[in-house]
Every structure is written in structure tokens, then in C-alpha cells.
């Protein structure tokens, strides 16, 4: 009896391993299929933009379906070099390494840039991935100098890094002298990395102070997020909580929630602070509870709902369509591959896989040879600003490729 039971358990164990192996093989084939697609699309884009000039970083498409590029001082130039690094990681092909090196090198002047908070997006997506994959000592030095530049925007008075310089809110009367946006959480990764690379703990301390203050002032009780918190420059107190790219000041902008999920997952990795992990979990659960069946969110979770009213100058006043935002979905998909490794009792990893399959479906993935080489369709830049509405966006592609990298790493480790 014991022998038969042992044989049965052994057969069941073998069957489960075999089934898992078959599933893994199918998923690896799924990854390879999408990597092949990304290679062909990105080559088409490279053929279109030519060599880096400092002014031709792919960003989106215009109303005529033509490629829109930006200069290096915009917030998005690091995503295209970062995508090239991910293609190198996914393929092992030195062609992508060579392209990534060229496009990354073109951003070196930004290492001393202090004009806004997005230096982490600009330099860590490019030089950070480059250093991770090559150990190039020049990249290390540039990352440390970039972290020093970003640190100049930190104020001990507010305990935060200033996101933007002076601007007005959508009501045209409230002035933002010290606006901090939830997006700023992503820039902290470059600071945490710079601490490890340099041995200078001040970078990490700034990141932690910013994360702590953001946790205190950007989150509502249900762990939805405000986009903008405006601080008093003299007292450091919160003057108001608002939106810039969301539907209304009290609504939850989907990509803002995505930045929070990604940012606090990363900060937990770097510090092992349980408050950050709990923030990531709670922000994720709010996000998941507001998703449609295909797991791709509406651009703002409160569009058209009672009690949510855009300010008069916002284009959201007249634009009430509940468009999906693929860029938010790509950010969260990538984040959940990591968060799932820290929280075993929740199915974040399985949800990340489902999200990745949804993003890779014909509904959201570009047709081969279309969209000027972008990978994903149906993202939203800023409806309030009447810009980049239902178009491909370079950062959606970046986080999609990062999700493929993270999934492949999990399947092959």
C-alpha cells in the first residue's frame, strides 16, 4: 500500500512538473514572439529617425499618424535608449547594444541638468540600464553626477524634491510655487542606485524623505492618489492637493496610481521598509478593484462620475469619453512582476501575466509594420492639455519591454 501510494504521489508530482514545464514553454514562446515583433518594429523606427542628434527622440504620433520626436530636455528622451537596452537584454544581439550605446551617449549633457524632476526617467532608464548590463565605469560616473543634479531640487523644508517650477492650477487662480507630483516617485530609483555606486548615503536619505512625505500627503484613506501636492515654500505645509493630468482634483488619474504602485514597490526593494511595501499593496488593490475585465484601465477612474468636476480650462470639461490608457497598464504590469515576488499570498504575479497577454493582444499591440514602429496603441498623455489622446507613447513601450524582461527572467531563473 505504501509503495503504491509513493508511486502515485511520484506520478502526480511528475505530471505537475511536466504540465508546468509545458506551460513555461508556451509562455517562453509567447515572449519570443513579442520580442521578435518588438525587434522588427524598433528597427523600422531606427530607420526612420536615423542617428541621434539630441533632438530626435521618439515620443508619439501626431493626428496625421506621423512620428513625433522631442529634444533631450523633454521628460521622455531616456525611454527610447532604455528600450534599446531591453532589446539587447532580451535578444543578446550586439546590434541592440551598439544602438543603445549610441542613443544613451547622446544624453550625457543631461548629467548636469536641474530644470525639472524627471532626470531619473531621462538618465536612469538609459544609463541605469546600460550600467546594469555592461558595468561601464563611465556610466557609473554619469549616474552619480546625475543624482547630484537631481538632489539640488530637494528641500529640507518640504522634505520633497520639487517636481516642476512655478505654474498655475487649472482654475487659473491657484498658484503652485512648489508642486510635487506622484510621478516623482520613479526618479528616486536613480538616487538609491547612486548611494550604492558612490557610498554617499545622502542620496538614499533624500529618496526616503521624499517617499515618506509622499506617503503622507499624496494618498487618500482608500490609497487612491492625488496627482499634485503643492507645498508652502516657507513653512513646508501642504497648501492644496490637485491634479494636472487627471480628470479632476479629487479624482484618481490611472497613470498617477501606476507611478505610486511602481515607486513604492521599488522603494521597498531598496530599503525593505514595510511601510513602503504596504503602500504598494494598498495602492495596487485600489487600482485592481477599478479595472475592467481586460485589465486595461480607463485613463482616470472617476471620469464622468457624480462629485468629480474638471476645472474650467481643462479639456476634460468637454471630453467625457472613457478612453483606456495602455501606458498606465504597462507600468503596473511591470511593477506587479516585482511586487508578486514580495507578496506570496496575493496573485500579483499571475495578474501581471494576464495583463501582459492583454497588452499583447490585437486590441492593444500595434499591427506589424504600423504605428511608425511603436509597440502599443491606445495610450493617453494628457486629456486636460488636449495632447496625446489615444496614441502610442514611448514610455508605454518601455514598460512593456521591461515587463517582458521581468517575465522572462522569472521563467528562466
Image (cartoon, helix red, strand yellow):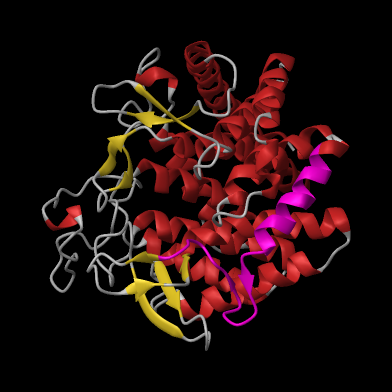
Q: Residue at x 28, y 45 (%)?
A: 324
Magenta range: 139-166
Image position of 299 (left or right of 154): left
Instruction: Note whether 36 is above or below 169 in the view shown.
Output: above
Residue 201 pos. (x, y %):
82, 68
Q: Quadrant of residue 32?
A: top right
Image position of 227 (left or right of 14): left
Instruction: Note whether 222 is above or below 35 in the view shown.
Output: below
> Is 233 within the magenta?
no
Residue 281 pos. (x, y %):
52, 67
Q: Residue at x 69, y 14 (%)?
A: 95
Visible in this render: residue 303?
Answer: yes
> Is 161 within the magenta?
yes
- The quarter of the rendered structure image containing the C terminus is top right
Number of on-image labels: 0
Q: Nearer the viewer, residue 352 or 41?
A: 41
Residue 272 pos. (x, y %):
72, 69
Instruction: Note whether 49 is above or below 342 in the view shown.
Output: above
Q: Nearer the viewer, residue 329 or 141?
A: 141
Residue 156 pos. (x, y %):
65, 79
Q: Residue at x 25, y 53 (%)?
A: 384
Image position of 64 (left or right of 91): left
Q: Nearer the viewer, residue 215 or 46?
A: 46
Q: Quadrant of residue 241?
A: bottom left
Q: Residue at x 18, y 55 (%)?
A: 316
Visible in this render: residue 14?
Answer: no
Amino acid at each position: 500500500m505504501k509503495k503504491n501510494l509513493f508511486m502515485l504521489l511520484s506520478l502526480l508530482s511528475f505530471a505537475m512538473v511536466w504540465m508546468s514545464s509545458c506551460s513555461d514553454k508556451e509562455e517562453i514562446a509567447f515572449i519570443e514572439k513579442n520580442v521578435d515583433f518588438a525587434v522588427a518594429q524598433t528597427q523600422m523606427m531606427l530607420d526612420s529617425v536615423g542617428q541621434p542628434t539630441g533632438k530626435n527622440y521618439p515620443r508619439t504620433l501626431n493626428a496625421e499618424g506621423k512620428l513625433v520626436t522631442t529634444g533631450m530636455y523633454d521628460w521622455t528622451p531616456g525611454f527610447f535608449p532604455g528600450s534599446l537596452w531591453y532589446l539587447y537584454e532580451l535578444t543578446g544581439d550586439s546590434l541592440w547594444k551598439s544602438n543603445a550605446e549610441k542613443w544613451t551617449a547622446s544624453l550625457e549633457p543631461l548629467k548636469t541638468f536641474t530644470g525639472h524632476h524627471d532626470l531619473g526617467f531621462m538618465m536612469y532608464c538609459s544609463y541605469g540600464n546600460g550600467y546594469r548590463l555592461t558595468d561601464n565605469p563611465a556610466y557609473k560616473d554619469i549616474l552619480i553626477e546625475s543624482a547630484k543634479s537631481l538632489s539640488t531640487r530637494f528641500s529640507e523644508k518640504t522634505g520633497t524634491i520639487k517636481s516642476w517650477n512655478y505654474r498655475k492650477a487649472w482654475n487659473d487662480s491657484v498658484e503652485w510655487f512648489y508642486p510635487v507630483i506622484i510621478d516623482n516617485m520613479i526618479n528616486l530609483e536613480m538616487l538609491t542606485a547612486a548611494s550604492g555606486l558612490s557610498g554617499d548615503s545622502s542620496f538614499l536619505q533624500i529618496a526616503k524623505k521624499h517617499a515618506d512625505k509622499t506617503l503622507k500627503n499624496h494618498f487618500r484613506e482608500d490609497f487612491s492618489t492625488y496627482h499634485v501636492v503643492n507645498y508652502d515654500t516657507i513653512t513646508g505645509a501642504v497648501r492644496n492637493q490637485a491634479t494636472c493630468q487627471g480628470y479632476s482634483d479629487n479624482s484618481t488619474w490611472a497613470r498617477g496610481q501606476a507611478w505610486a504602485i511602481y515607486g513604492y514597490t521599488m522603494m521597498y526593494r531598496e530599503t525593505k521598509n514595510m511601510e513602503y511595501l504596504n503602500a504598494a499593496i494598498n495602492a495596487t488593490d485600489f487600482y485592481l478593484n477599478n479595472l475592467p475585465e481586460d485589465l486595461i484601465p480607463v485613463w482616470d477612474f472617476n471620469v464622468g462620475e457624480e462629485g468629480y468636476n474638471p476645472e474650467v480650462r481643462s479639456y476634460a470639461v468637454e471630453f467625457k469619453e472613457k478612453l483606456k490608457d495602455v501606458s498606465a497598464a504597462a507600468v503596473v504590469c511591470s511593477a506587479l512582476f516585482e511586487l508578486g515576488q514580495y507578496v506570496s499570498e496575493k496573485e500579483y504575479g499571475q495578474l501581471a501575466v494576464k495583463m501582459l497577454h492583454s497588452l499583447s493582444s490585437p486590441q492593444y499591440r500595434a499591427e506589424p509594420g504600423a504605428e511608425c514602429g511603436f509597440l502599443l496603441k491606445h495610450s493617453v498623455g494628457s486629456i486636460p492639455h488636449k495632447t496625446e489622446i489615444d496614441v502610442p507613447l514611448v514610455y508605454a513601450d518601455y514598460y512593456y519591454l521591461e515587463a517582458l524582461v521581468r517575465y522572462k527572467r522569472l521563467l528562466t531563473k
